[in-house]
Image (tube, helix red, strand yellow):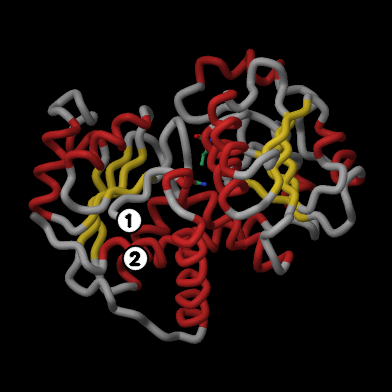
């Protein structure tokens, strides 16, 4: 495992191994311990889009493990592919740093980085997927519900990058995902097929959020307007009416179900304030686990890495 680009490219064993390591490191750091396995190592972090959780959790994780993270924004290095091609940046960075993480619009940009970089490349969100988020999500689900096998997630909203990574992680870890999206905003058929080819019938779709939450252990949502879709805002707000996680929907779900959201949350749109704040919400544990999972991922990928 050189890179971490998409969950669908990882084996179940690799994912379980990362989760085990994340649990171990979480327990160690909660006790005040430290693991300086990345002493002297550097991570370059490239961002074409805004980020709070991903940027900070990777940066803190690098510091926690004894290393250093460099935050590179378009103002510093130029837009990827505009000032110079991604393949040139990837090869130059591979001479300086031990790892590269990138948040891009096009997923192909990350794939190209990984192809040309000789050091590990991590997908910190692309328009296509958000694998680090999905791994922190399943870590949180396991902590709260005691298992992953057979867990049913109801995802209400846009069939976007977050939904796609949830579909892939469900397929790899024997979970069930029911996607409730308005017409025109479904997760693409190829991704659903890819998930269902991995574990038959693990991803299903419906137009009715109330059908989706029936028997669900987790109710999950994400913004209706992902970064880069701002021009479609008005149209999307109209189309997504009825696809909000709110008290009425939670009342139709099992009592034990938990509420999740990758954040940032737009209260009053995809989720109400009382749903974010309700006792069933594990949203902030989910955000915290971004840090614990990043530590595990960095330890796994960067420990043996050297610049070219
Ligand atoms: N959930 C998530 O990736 O948050 P950021 O966009 O703030 O990194
Ligand atoms: N789907 C959202 C996730 C943000 C973490 C986006 O891509 O903007």
Sequence-wise, the earlier of marks 2 and 1 is 1
The quadrant holding residue 104 is top left
In the picture provided, is 140 more to the left or to the right than 75?
A: right
Dots 2 and 1: beta carbons under 8 Å?
Answer: yes
Image location of residue 21, percent across then percent down:
46, 72
In the picture provided, is 103 more to the left or to the right than 232?
A: left
**Please, what secondary structure does the residue beneath circle 2 have?**
helix
The residue under label 1 is 1
Q: Give the mark toward the camera: 2 or 1.
A: 1
Q: Nearer the viewer, residue 39 or 270?
A: 39
The residue at 66%/68% (across/down) is 143
Mark carried by residue 208: none
The residue at 65%/53% (across/down) is 174
On-image quarter of the C terminus: bottom left
Spatial separation of the CA atoms under disc 2 and disc 1: 9 Å
Image location of residue 191, percent across then percent down:
54, 31
Mark carried by residue 300: 2
């Amino acid at each position: 495992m050189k890179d971490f680009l998409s969950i669908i490219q990882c084996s179940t064993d690799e994912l379980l191994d990362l989760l085990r390591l994340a649990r171990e490191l979480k327990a160690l750091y909660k006790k005040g311990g430290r693991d300086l396995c990345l002493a002297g190592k550097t991570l370059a972090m490239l961002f074409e889009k805004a980020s709070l959780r991903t940027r900070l959790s990777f940066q803190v994780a690098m510091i926690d493990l004894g290393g250093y993270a460099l935050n590179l924004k378009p103002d510093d290095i130029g837009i990827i592919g505009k000032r110079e091609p991604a393949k040139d940046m990837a090869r130059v960075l591979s001479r300086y740093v031990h790892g590269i993480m990138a948040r891009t619009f096009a997923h192909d940009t990350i794939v190209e980085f990984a192809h040309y970089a000789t050091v590990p490349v991590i997908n910190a969100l692309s328009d296509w997927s958000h694998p680090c988020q999905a791994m922190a999500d399943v870590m949180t689900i396991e902590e709260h519900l005691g298992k992953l096998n057979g867990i049913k997630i109801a995802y209400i909203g846009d069939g976007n990058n977050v939904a796609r990574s949830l579909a892939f992680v469900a397929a790899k870890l024997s979970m069930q995902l029911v996607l409730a999206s308005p017409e025109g905003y479904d997760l693409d058929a190829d991704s659903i097929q890819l998930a269902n080819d991995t574990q038959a019938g693990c991803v299903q779709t419906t137009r009715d959020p109330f059908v989706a939450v029936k028997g669900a252990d987790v109710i999950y949502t994400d913004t209706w307007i992902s970064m880069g879709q701002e021009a479609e805002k008005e149209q999307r707000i109209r189309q997504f009416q009825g696809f909000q996680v709110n008290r009425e929907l939670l009342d139709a779900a099992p009592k034990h179900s938990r509420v999740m959201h990758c954040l940032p949350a737009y209260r009053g749109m995809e989720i109400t304030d009382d749903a974010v704040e309700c006792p069933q919400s594990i949203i902030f544990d989910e955000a915290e686990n971004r840090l614990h999972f990043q530590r595990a991922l960095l330890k796994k990928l960067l420990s043996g890495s050297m610049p070219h």
